[in-house]
Image (cartoon, rainbow, N blue to C red):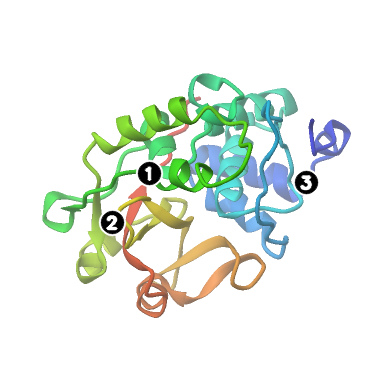
Amino acid sequence: MLLFSYQGFSQISQPLRVAIQAARKTHDVSLIGMQFIGKPYTSHALSDQNPEKLVVDLNAFDCVTFIENSLALVQSNGIDSIYRKGLIHNRYAGDSITYEKRYHYFSDAMRNLRFPLVGTRDMLVQAPKSFSFLSTYLSTKPAVQIDLVRLRERERALSQQPFVYTPIALLNKLLPLLKSGDLIGLVSKKSSIDFLHTGMVYRQNGHVYLLHASQEFNRVMISKLTLVDYLKTHKQFIGVCAFRPIFKE
C-alpha cells in the first residue's frame, strides 16, 4: 500500500529539486523541511494494519514522518526508487517492513542510523528509561495482532543502552553547537518513553527555533518561540537530544 504517486514524485517541484541538491552539499536537512511549511499535521500517519503496509506520503506528516521523509529526500538525490529505499531504511530496523521492527522510539532510529549526539559531557546527564510505553499500551488493546514478545525484546534492549540528554537548565551550553538541520528529540518526563516530540533545528538571527510538524498548530511550521522558550512553555519536556545527520555521497 503506497499512499504516494510515483508519477507525482517524478514531477517533483523545481524548488524541492534545488533544495535537495543544496541539502546534499551542506548536510542541512532543514532546507528540505522548509519546503513543507504549511503542510497539514496528521496523527497516526503510519500503518495500523498487520502485516505492516508501507506508507509513503509527502502531503501530510506527523513529527517523525516529517523527519523520515526529509532525510529520505536528501538521500534520494531526486530519484524516486532511492527515496523509497531511504524511507524504508530510516523507518525500519534491517530494512524489514514489519511493525515489530519499526523504529517506534526515535532514539532507536538515531542510534541505528549512526547519527551522532551533539554535546559534550558537561552538558549531558543520564536518565533511566524503560522504553516500555508501547508494549504496555498495546497489551491493553483487545485482539492486538502485534507480536508483543518481540516488541518487548526490542524495548528491553533499548533500556539497557545509556540514555543521555541535555536538560533545560544546561541548554544554553548546547545552543552554540547546534546547526540548522540538526534533529531534535524533546525528552519526556516519563521513564517509559524517550521523546514526546521531534523536529529540526532552524537558526535565524542567532536564535534557535524548532522546524516541526506541530500537532498544536496542525501544520508544519517554524516554532513561534525559540527552542528555549518553547521548552519553558511546554512542561511535559525536561530537555532535548540533538542528533547530527550524516549523508554519504
What is the distance, in whole Å, between disc 2 and disc 3 at their CAs? Answer: 32 Å
Tell me which corner region of the image, top left, top right, bottom left or bottom right, holds residue 105. top left
Looking at the image, the residue that sits furthest to the front is 142
Above/below status of 199 relative to 17: below
Q: CA distance from mark 1 to mark 2?
A: 32 Å
Q: Residues within 10 Å of mark 1 (few under 14, many from 20)?
A: some
Is residue 107 rendered to the left or right of residue 41?
left
Q: Amino acid at mark 2?
A: Leu
Identify the element where label 3 is drawn: helix
- Residue 87 in view, yes or no: yes
* Whether residue 105 is visible: no
**Of callouts 1 and 2, the N-terminal one:** 1
Q: Secondary structure at mark 2?
A: helix
Amino acid type, residue under disc 3 in the picture = Gln
Residue at 52% x, 47% y is: 140
User: Does residue 111 lie above or below 219 as drawn?
Assistant: above
SS of the residue under disc 1: loop
Q: Residues within 10 Å of mark 3 (few under 14, many from 20)?
A: few
Does residue 171 appear to the left or right of 91 in the view shown?
Answer: left
Residue 239 numbered tag:
none
Q: Which residue appears at 44% of the width and 27% of the height?
A: 149
Q: Position of residue 118 (x, y in %)?
A: 28, 48
Q: Amino acid at mark 1?
A: Ser
Residue to which mark 1 is pinned:
132
- Badge 3 is on which residue? 14
The mark that comes first in sequence, 2 or 3, is 3
Residue 244: x, y in percent?
A: 38, 44
**Quadrant hosting residue 48:** top right
Disc 2 target residue? 177
Q: Nearer the viewer, residue 171 or 19?
A: 171
Give the x, y percent position of residue 125: 16, 54
